[in-house]
Amino acid sequence: MKSTLLLIVATSLLYACGESADPRAATTIEPTTKSYIGSAACRACHEDQADKWQDSHHQLAMREATPTNVAGDFANAAFTTPNGSSVFISQEGIAGGLIISTSLGDDHQTEFAVKYAFGIQPLQQYLLDTGDGRLQAFTLAWDTRPEDQGGQRWFDLRPGEAISSADTLHWRGRAYNWNDMCADCHSTAVKKNYVVDTDSYATTFAELSVGCEACHGPGSEHVALAKIGELAPAGLTDIRPQGAQINVCAPCHSRRSQLADGFQPEHSFFDHYAPALLDSGLYYPDGQIREEVYVYGSFLQSKMHSRGVRCADCHDPHSAQLSLTGNAVCTTCHQLQRRADFPTAGGKDYERFEHHFHAEGSTGAQCVNCHMPATVYMEVDPRRDHSFRIPRPDLTVELDVPNACNQCHTDRTADWAAQQIRLRHGEKRADHFAQSFAAASRGLIRAEPELARLVMDITQPTMVRATAAARLAPYNRGYTLDALQDGLADPDPLVRYGSLRGLAGLTEDSRWRLGNALLFDEHRTIRHQAFRTLLRSASNTSHRAILRPLLSDYLEVLAFNGDRPEAHTRAAMAHAALGTFGDAESAFNKALTIEPDWVPAMVNLADLYRANGRDLQGRDLLQRAIVSAPEDAGVHYAFALWLVRNDETDRALGQFAQARLLAPDQPDYSYALALVLNGNGRTRQALELLEEAHAQWPQNTDLLFALATITRDLERFAEAVKYAEKLRQIEPGNKNYRILKDGLVQRLGTTPDL
């Protein structure tokens, strides 16, 4: 769900807390376990910070739905979408007195009590109690902006989409479940407490909103120590250093998955969360934000991060607002007079026309509009990119990524913008990882050494290095082996995490040799990813013997996410890899109980049946999967393979063709379809398809090998040699490609390579 995660988590240190104006009044302290005591206990000693926090986005992150706390119009206001109609009602006699009557995605009107108001600016959502401990975020929200800015209205978070009640994106679906998707970042010390046997929740929190202890940790020990005169950071973790601040802010200001609850400032982010990298679909190839990814992944790319800038250097950690307004927040460091703490940021007047080339005081002269362009999410919520980048319209021309210039100059082309940059700053632009990431997304062989260099270049941002390592997954040459060996030993857990993801394309033995030490890493996230990655090496008896004792820890993380079908699917895959097929089948079926249309469980359960001699049982599952996800190319591909195995080749051709039509960017589907065509006597069509695919993916070795062997079998040796030579050029050390070419050369009657 695209929940409203609000600004920067409070990060400054509280120095003392207590109920007495004189914290030295108490003279004894009993040793106790740290516990949460609530933000009210902090005010006595920290009144200034408490005043700033009051009415901040953190303090207003979640409140009881009372007429005072609710911004929306509940005076029988009505709103209609193509999915149904809703009426917002104020009614006496029920707790809070607010009701939403809706037929969104249903064929009838149902009333739900509004339990909580969620967020405040620029929109407010409402949490509805749907039973079994579930709270669901309603997908009609109130626009809290002023009316002259288009606000003070109800609006649809998913306008124009036809969403049925069975859809995950329906407001009652998993994507809008508060317990799993939202609670951890809108309240303090949340315990999800999902009960798998009853498919229900008993979720708790220490404080309803984001309070002092959400950032500083449980305060009981600090208060007790303050009462006997031990002030400063006594009883609390010092979160003033940059690393400590990012560690505290990242859980709520990153795109991540959660592995466990109970995070506190003294814990590592990597013991509770697994961050998203700069993955295609989430970020553009140059690292700009695309989907709603929040701040962490962007900030870790920035020079600001590399120079030691902290969240609290720009944001007041208690009010959650910028410390200063306009360009002043930037020019405190970026000024003519160099600062001792950030000397590389100064030495220039950044407010001059010669720097920004726009009229003084204009929109274009604002630092953020060039260096932190905004993207609107949730229809009304602009979020700024925190990678603090230099505008690169030349990359727009080359890679079709956005640029800040054309975000304002919408009537101009990217070529024009790139020319303006050249006129003002010369022809040369700095090297950028964007080209390597874009090449990797296209499956180009040349991307492999470029990615490997990024991984091993310690001057690159850790987020870039980690992503480069993960993008090595399709590759398996020496470049990849060397880079991943370095990455897996890197002191930064983010790089180790990305490197584990990069092991996918290696042989079973290489994967195990490089990655097995991380099964015992100090951080839970790394251990979990290592186990998941190395399950693919479990066919080896000795490997399996090491993995089996670690299964319980892996399953513990999956049990925390037991309200998600993917958790049970991963558990099933682990059981299958370790040879406990009955447990695997049960876990797949549990996933399908939670979500009957969960396609990964259907497809993988069908494959489990195949592996256990029950292939015929897979047919119904795969046909169900096609009904559930008719636009999923992978499902058509899986069913095509099933049809080939069961001698229904003619039908298989149609399924392969559909997979290729749905995913034209996937060479595997063209390759498989060509092989089946060739095997079915339709060699001319197979060659035409392979040649078309080869033109699109000129360095794909599977396509080239098929072209070489099929033309060889047709005794078209000159063509076959041409394709074999291309294979040799791509992988000069591959013995099989050399043997293939030498044999073809001999058939052609020329001299083989020496």
Image: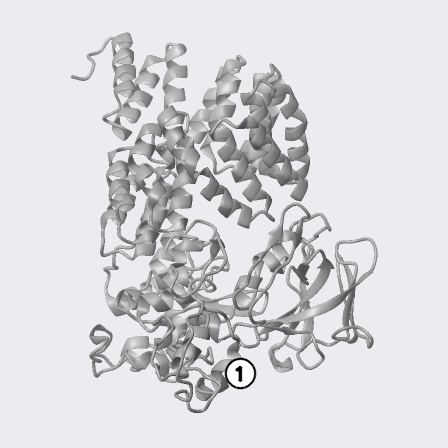
Q: Position of residue 435 (x, y in %)?
A: 33, 49
Mark 1 nearby-residue class (10 Å; few <14, some 14–19, many ≥20): some
Quarter assignment of residue 90: bottom right
Q: Specify the farthest residue to the left.
A: 754
Q: In this view, does 750 lie above or below 197?
A: above
Look at the image and tell me whether residue 577 can be seen.
yes
Q: Specify the farthest residue to the bottom.
A: 21
Q: Position of residue 724 (x, y in %)?
A: 31, 21
Q: Which amino acid does label 1 sit on?
A: Gln
Helix, strand or loop under label 1: loop
Q: Position of residue 664 (x, y in %)?
A: 51, 37
Q: Is residue 199 above or below residue 120?
A: above
Residue wearing tag 1: 54
Residue at horizontal 51 percent and vertical 14 percent from the top: 679
Quarter assignment of residue 264: bottom left
Residue at horizontal 52 percent and vertical 45 percent from the top: 558
Q: In this view, does 14 lie above or below 678?
A: below
Look at the image and tell me whether residue 390 can be seen.
no
Q: Nearer the viewer, residue 261 or 745?
A: 261
Q: In this view, does 738 lie above or below 513?
A: above
Residue at horizontal 41 percent and vertical 71 percent from the top: 31
Q: Nearer the viewer, residue 412 or 165?
A: 165
Q: Where is residue 686 in the image (x, y as percent from the top left)?
A: 49, 20
Taking the image as shown, residue 460 lies to the left or right of residue 135, namely left
Taking the image as shown, residue 483 lies to the left or right of residue 394, namely left
Quarter assignment of residue 231: bottom left
The colour scheme applied to this rendered structure is one colour
Taking the image as shown, residue 301 lies to the left or right of residue 580, namely left
> Split into 4 quadrants, where in the image is the N terminus?
bottom right
